[in-house]
Image: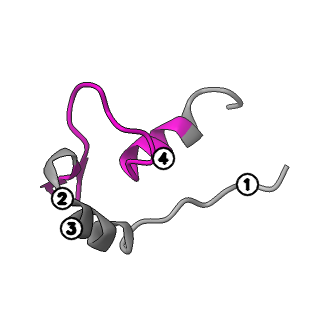
Amino acid sequence: ESGCGKTTTGRAILQLYEPTAGEIVFDGINLTHLDTKDLRDMRKRMQMIFQDP
């Protein structure tokens, strides 16, 4: 569905947006409490896949 927040959710998971409330858990690890180095290491296990229009 167009405009339902898929990209926003993905960006929040990758912490391209800083969360203002709640937690983001990926593979059992709470990403909201990671320091810069650990977050960079976790991002190596994630990726955004954009759809061509």
Q: Which mark is residue 35?
A: 2
Q: Amino acid at mark 2?
A: Asp
| Residue plotted at (15% across, 57% down) | 29
Q: Is disc 1 surrounded by few (<14), some (14 to 19) or many (20+) residues within 10 Å?
A: few
Q: Quick one: 36 or 2, which is closer to the camera?
A: 36
Q: Which residue is mark 3?
A: 38
Q: Is 21 situated above or below 35?
A: above
Q: Which mark is residue 51?
A: 1
Q: CA distance from mark 3 to mark 4?
A: 18 Å
Q: CA distance from mark 2 to mark 1?
A: 30 Å
Q: Amino acid at mark 3?
A: Asp
User: Left or right of 11: which side holds 27?
Assistant: left
**3 or 4: mark nearer the eye:** 3
| Mark 2 or mark 4: whose residue is earlier in sequence | 4
Q: CA distance from mark 2 to mark 4?
A: 19 Å
Q: Which mark is residue 10?
A: 4
Q: Amino acid at mark 1?
A: Gln
Please tell me in which quadrant of the rendered image residue 27 appears.
bottom left
Q: Is residue 26 magenta?
A: yes
Give the residues drawn in magenta, as a range: 8-31
Q: Is disc 3 surrounded by few (<14), some (14 to 19) or many (20+) residues within 10 Å?
A: few
| Mark 4 or mark 1: whose residue is earlier in sequence | 4
Q: Position of residue 17 (x, y in %)?
A: 43, 40
Q: CA distance from mark 3 to mark 1?
A: 28 Å
| Residue plotted at (40% across, 53% down) | 14
Q: Quick one: 50 or 33, which is closer to the camera?
A: 33
